[in-house]
Image (spheres, coloured by chain):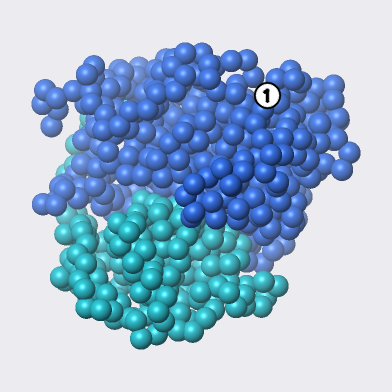
Chain colours: A cyan, B blue
């Protein structure tokens, strides 16, 4: 996983609440067996009409075609558990999503892919959206180590993040490797549980 | 761990699965059952392969195909190439990693959330995960069951654990008895209408109250299934005799003396008296009428007796704009009576309402009636077992004679991934769980409702109050 340290980039304003995962990546694009290549279908129904780009959609306009940050309203990423949603964002180039709050599974999935979800109050999001609407010179900086978002005028806004997740993200560490360091504990725990719940049959098909 | 503090059902399941706890409170949580399907697993198995890892507990894992599969003439194979590749990839992966699998042509095949409880694989007190948000369904047996992403699927395959922080406790009590014709679907839609699509974020919801106790297991599964539409991580119903009677004799459940020992343990799971919840919401069952959604998220829901709402009545500008967009997408006019909205398609099925009880409820309304002219109506059993049972009861004939299509088990028209899709502009009365834009096919318009209400829409040709047909 690519580490996330600091990012200075164009931010795309998407002032919409309840952006669901079907909007981020519709089900018909979930047939892939790969993680990459979904960027062209990101926000497919909002982005295209009859195969043509809709000029009014933010990611079809300059400079937002090159956005690496997305700012939205409440409950971003609600709906399905599909990790194709963060994969599509990442493949497009988005490394950070800022919103008042996120759906739980989507929030989890971001961290596994090196995307930083930042929770900030609605009023702050609206302010950042106004900044973003100024266009290409109005870049935002997101500094994970210091836990701040820096506005184009230099004002710094702090955000909260789980220390463990911050550590993994800053260092680009893979969860599985972390957990496997505890393999012995898992073995012991599992053995005790099996003894205690000896009534539980294994899943086995003929 | 237990101490003296009274604990909720969630607390007990959580505490009994913590393998390790880090300084910041993140836990290594042991997972008892892992359900796998073709859409969210290929990249996870690929990850294992690349890292040279194996599946730690194949005997705690079960795989099935459901999302992509056609629901007719499947003996001739899957025509759509990408879908076929996904199914074949799963088949190769389960063979390579030794994971138990219900193949497409086996009667045990079905929607992953139908087959877990049906086969007795999902049991009380367990932690259960699947790369699918509606894993919350299994909470109906009194298990902590939640959806995960593909990276987490890989994590569970490799380690049989997940890294998680505990959720907050929320209690939703539905008191009293529901009126005639009111089903679990109406109850859960009313709950979502009350708390909103983000109302449960960060929480696990335990459902209590006389109306929940009075539901059969199918109804409890419907309620827990849609918990995710209220933003909660999982839904739970405390296990009781209804639960134990349901589990007894299921193929993968403990049997004989082992069953008795299991029940003794399961009886210790319900919340201790005085256990505290971070949030509590109470609804009166008697106040809940048959519900139907009018917009493009599940909180946009109203009683069938109501009218399409007017955005001008809403003060908040952003909310007003969202409402206009919803009405525009749905092709509805403010003030229009919900019970007069014509439908093109009726879909009865999905992990929300694809069980035998749901098909019985639909057949009871349809018996002696016919599908209205111009309406396409489908019934898609949630599993091969449900299909066989319905056929043994003659329900398939009641439905087909009335003009319904009777199909093979799968997710079908719940989402636009297999051949069963809406065409742009088509309006569907659907027993599924999501009415997002394009969910049932690009441009499709979805109204969520109960199986009985869907049957009523099929025979009248429009959304209708089932109480007038009963
Ligand atoms: S029936 Fe629908 S909600 Fe359920 S698992 Fe299938 S696609 Fe998901």
User: x, y (%) of residue B79?
Assistant: 72, 62
User: Measuring 55% from the left and 23% from the top, which residue is drawn there?
Assistant: B288
Residue B194 to residue B208: above or below? below
User: Measuring 36% from the left and 86% from the top, which residue is drawn there?
Assistant: A137
Kindly state the secondary structure of the residue where label 1 is placed.
helix
Q: Is residue A66 left or right of residue B390?
A: left
Image quadrant assignment for residue B376: top right
- Report which residue position mark 1 lands on: B361
Q: Is residue A196 left or right of residue B348?
A: left
Specify the quadrant that holds the N terminus of chain B: top left
Residue B370 to residue A110: above or below? above
Residue B345 to residue A75: above or below? above
Q: Residues within 10 Å of mark 1 (few under 14, many from 20)?
A: some
User: x, y (%) of residue B309?
Assistant: 62, 40
Image quadrant assignment for residue B49: bottom left
- In the picture as drawn, the residue positioned furthest to the right comes out as B373
Mark 1 CB in 8 Å range of ligand 1?
Answer: no
User: Measuring 46% from the left and 44% from the top, which residue is drawn there?
Assistant: B197
User: x, y (%) of residue A30?
Assistant: 55, 63
Q: Does the rendering let one see residue B102?
A: no
Q: Does the rendering let one see residue A127?
A: yes
Specify the quadrant that holds the C terminus of chain B: top right
Count up the numbered dots.
1
Q: Chain of mark 1?
A: B
């Amino acid at each position: 996983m690519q580490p996330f340290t600091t990012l200075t980039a164009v931010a795309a304003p998407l002032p919409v609440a309840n952006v669901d995962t079907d909007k981020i990546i519709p089900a018909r694009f979930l047939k892939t067996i790969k993680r990459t290549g979904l960027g062209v279908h990101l926000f497919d129904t909002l982005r295209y009409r009859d195969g043509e780009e809709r000029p009014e959609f933010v990611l079809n306009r300059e400079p937002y075609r090159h956005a690496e940050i997305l700012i939205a309203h409440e409950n971003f990423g609600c709906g399905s558990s599909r990790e194709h949603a963060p994969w599509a964002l990442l493949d497009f180039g988005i490394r950070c999503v800022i919103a008042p709050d996120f759906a739980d599974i989507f929030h989890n999935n971001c961290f596994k892919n090196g995307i930083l979800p930042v929770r900030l109050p609605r009023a702050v999001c609206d302010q950042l959206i106004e900044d973003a609407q100024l266009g290409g010179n109005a870049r935002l900086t997101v500094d994970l180590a210091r836990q701040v978002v820096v506005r184009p005028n230099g004002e710094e806004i702090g955000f909260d993040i789980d220390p463990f997740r911050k550590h993994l993200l800053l260092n680009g560490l893979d969860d599985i490797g972390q957990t496997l360091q505890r393999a012995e504990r898992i073995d012991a725990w599992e053995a005790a549980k099996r003894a205690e719940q000896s009534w539980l049959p294994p899943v086995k098909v003929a | 761990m237990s101490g003296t503090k009274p604990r909720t059902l969630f607390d007990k399941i959580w505490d009994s699965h913590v393998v390790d706890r880090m300084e910041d409170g993140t836990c290594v949580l042991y997972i008892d059952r892992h359900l796998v399907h073709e859409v969210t697993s290929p990249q996870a198995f690929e990850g294992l392969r690349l890292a040279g890892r194996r599946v730690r507990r194949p005997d705690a894992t079960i795989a099935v195909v459901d999302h992509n599969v056609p629901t007719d003439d499947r003996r001739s194979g899957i025509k759509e190439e990408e879908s076929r590749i996904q199914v074949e990839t799963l088949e190769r992966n389960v063979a390579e990693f030794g994971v138990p699998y219900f193949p497409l042509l086996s009667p045990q095949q079905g929607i992953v959330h139908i087959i877990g409880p049906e086969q007795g694989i999902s049991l009380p007190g367990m932690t259960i995960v699947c790369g699918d948000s509606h894993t919350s369904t299994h909470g109906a047996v009194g298990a902590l069951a939640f959806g995960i992403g593909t990276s987490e699927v890989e994590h569970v395959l490799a380690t049989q654990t997940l890294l998680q922080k505990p959720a907050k406790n929320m209690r939703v009590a539905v008191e009293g008895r529901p009126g005639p014709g009111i089903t679990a679907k109406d109850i859960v839609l009313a709950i979502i209408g009350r708390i909103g699509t983000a109302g449960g974020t960060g929480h696990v919801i335990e459902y209590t109250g006389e109306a929940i106790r009075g539901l059969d297991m199918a109804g409890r599964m419907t309620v827990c299934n849609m918990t995710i539409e209220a933003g909660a991580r999982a839904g739970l119903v405390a296990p009781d005799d209804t639960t134990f009677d349901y589990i007894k004799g299921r193929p993968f459940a403990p049997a004989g003396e082992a069953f008795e020992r299991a029940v003794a343990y399961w009886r210790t799971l319900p919340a201790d008296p005085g256990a505290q919840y971070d949030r509590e919401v109470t609804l009166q069952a008697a106040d809940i009428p048959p519900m139907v959604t009018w917009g493009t998220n599940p909180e946009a829901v109203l009683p069938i007796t109501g009218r399409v709402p007017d955005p001008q009545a809403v003060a908040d500008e952003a909310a007003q704009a969202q409402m206009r967009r919803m009405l525009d997408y749905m092709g509805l006019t403010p003030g229009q009576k919900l019970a007069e909205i014509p439908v093109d398609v009726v879909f009865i099925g999905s992990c929300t309402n694809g069980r035998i009880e749901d098909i019985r409820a639909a057949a009871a309304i349809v018996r002696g009636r016919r599908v209205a002219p111009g309406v396409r109506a489908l019934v898609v059993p949630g599993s091969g077992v449900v299909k066989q049972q319905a056929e043994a009861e003659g329900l398939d004939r009641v439905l087909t004679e009335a003009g319904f299509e009777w199909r093979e088990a799968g997710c079908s028209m719940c989402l636009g991934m297999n051949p069963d899709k809406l065409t742009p502009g088509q309006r569907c009365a659907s027993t599924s769980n999501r009415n997002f834009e394009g969910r049932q096919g690009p441009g499709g318009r979805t109204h969520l409702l109960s199986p009985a209400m869907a049957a009523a829409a099929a025979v009248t040709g429009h959304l209708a109050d089932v109480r007038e047909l009963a």
